[in-house]
Image: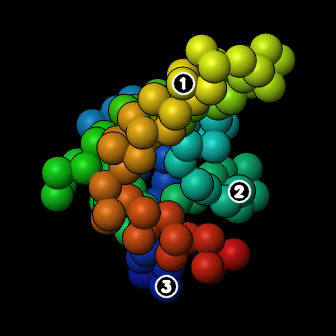
Amino acid sequence: MDDPMIPDLLTPAQAAEILGMTQQGVQKQIARGALPARRVGRQHVIRRAVVEALADRDGGAPVADVAAALGDLQTAEAEHRSAPDERTAHRVERARAAALAAISPEVVAALAGHLEAR
């Protein structure tokens, strides 16, 4: 947003520019829950710290990689709930490890800060 009173909030368009994504891609990540945002009126806003942590500036994975890894984990967990066996349990563990590997400490810190602000 261009309001100097709230400089730490970004519009989806501004987040898209920082993340190297389209605005539609950012909207999809928000809808999936992979990019935490709040609705203000008719528009979402995203904390700048979260976007910058996801921007792959310090070796973390880009937001699309994190979202994909978390999506794979959700799919594996759903499969294991519907057919619990050793194969699906191993798939959940592999997906969990991949999701953790995709998330850098900077991303975790930014997301934790976002959750504390709620």
Amino acid type, label 3: Met
- Residue at image coords 73%, 50%: 42
Q: Position of residue 39 (x, y in %)?
A: 71, 56
**Whether residue 48 is visible:** no
Which numbered disc, 1 or 2, marks the residue that appears first in the sequence? 2
| Residue furthest out toward the front | 86
Residue on which disc 3 sits: 5
Q: Position of residue 96 (x, y in %)?
A: 50, 38
Q: Nearer the viewer, mark 3 or mark 2?
A: 2
**85 left or right, relative to 76:** right
Which quadrant is home to the C terminus?
Answer: bottom right
Measured in 3D between alpha carbons, the distance from the residue under mark 1 to the one under mark 3, in whole angstroms, is: 49 Å
Residue on which disc 2 sits: 39
Say which quarter of the image contains residue 20: top left
Residue on which disc 1 sits: 90
Give the colouring mode of the picture. Answer: rainbow
- Residue at image coords 45%, 29%: 94
Q: Nearer the viewer, mark 1 or mark 3?
A: 1
Q: Position of residue 75 (x, y in %)?
A: 65, 22
Q: Judging from the image, what secondary structure is the residue with disc 3 in?
A: loop
Above-or-below relation of 19 to 36: above
Q: Judging from the image, what secondary structure is the residue with disc 1 in?
A: helix
| Residue furthest out toward the left | 58
